[in-house]
Amino acid sequence: MAGADLHFSREVDLAPIIVWDALIDPVLLEGWLGDVALEPSVDGAVGIRWLDGSYPATTAGRVTAFEHRTRLHVVTDNRGSFAFELAAVPGGSRGDGTVLGLTVCELAGAAARGSAAIGWALALDRLEELLRGHPVRWDDWRATHAHALAHMSEKDNIR
């Protein structure tokens, strides 16, 4: 459906190389997204075990674009596709900043789009916290967000 894609943009006060590492390094990925196995190359396998309590709990996919420090695109079996794009911008606390763009596509139905919008917005918040030196503690995070997640599930916004 045209126009149904989700688009997010965040300006991060760190250089693209630092943000890029948080998108491809399994240890850093666990600090904001979940338990991720990623082969960092075009056609590389991707496996995600979502630790935020969302459903389905696992996702498999393939890297369809991999441009070092600028673009990572993944097509999945159950969460559509997502593309991260990084652009250096002047400024930041160390002289460089990053504009991080995320586009999520191929989501079937309003409930899936609503769930993805909430889930990715929360994930990007967690990414920013990780980049500030505060990786998520998943048990604490799920407990803190349990009421909101249960309410959204009841409203058919999260599956």
Image (cartoon, rainbow, N blue to C red):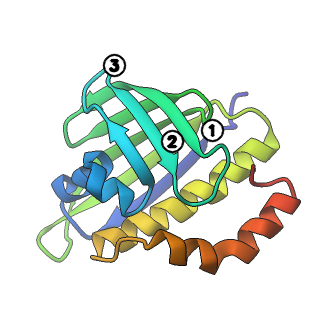
Where residue 52 appears, as percent x and y from the top left, is: 57, 60
Secondary-structure class at tag 1: loop
Q: Which residue is mark 2?
A: 103
Residue at the extreme left of the image, as rendered: 95
| Image disc number at residue 106 | none
Q: Which residue is mark 3?
A: 43
48 vs 83, nearest the viewer: 48
Where residue 65 appears, as percent x and y from the top left, is: 34, 26
**Residues at badges 2 and 1 in contact (C-beta under 8 Å)?**
yes
Q: Is residue 101 above or below residue 152?
A: above
Residue at the extreme front of the image, as rendered: 139
Q: What residue is drawn where x is 29% and y is 22%?
A: 42
Q: What residue is drawn where x is 12% and y is 69%?
A: 95
- Graded by Cα atoms within 10 Å as few (under 14), some (14 to 19) or many (20 or more), the crowding at tag 1 reads some
Q: Is residue 80 left or right of residue 49?
A: right
Secondary-structure class at tag 2: strand
3 vs 1, front mark:
3
Q: What residue is drawn where x is 27% and y is 76%?
A: 133
For the residues labelled 3 and 2, the Cα–Cα distance comes to: 19 Å
Q: Is residue 40 above or below residue 48?
A: above
Residue at the extreme right of the image, as rendered: 155
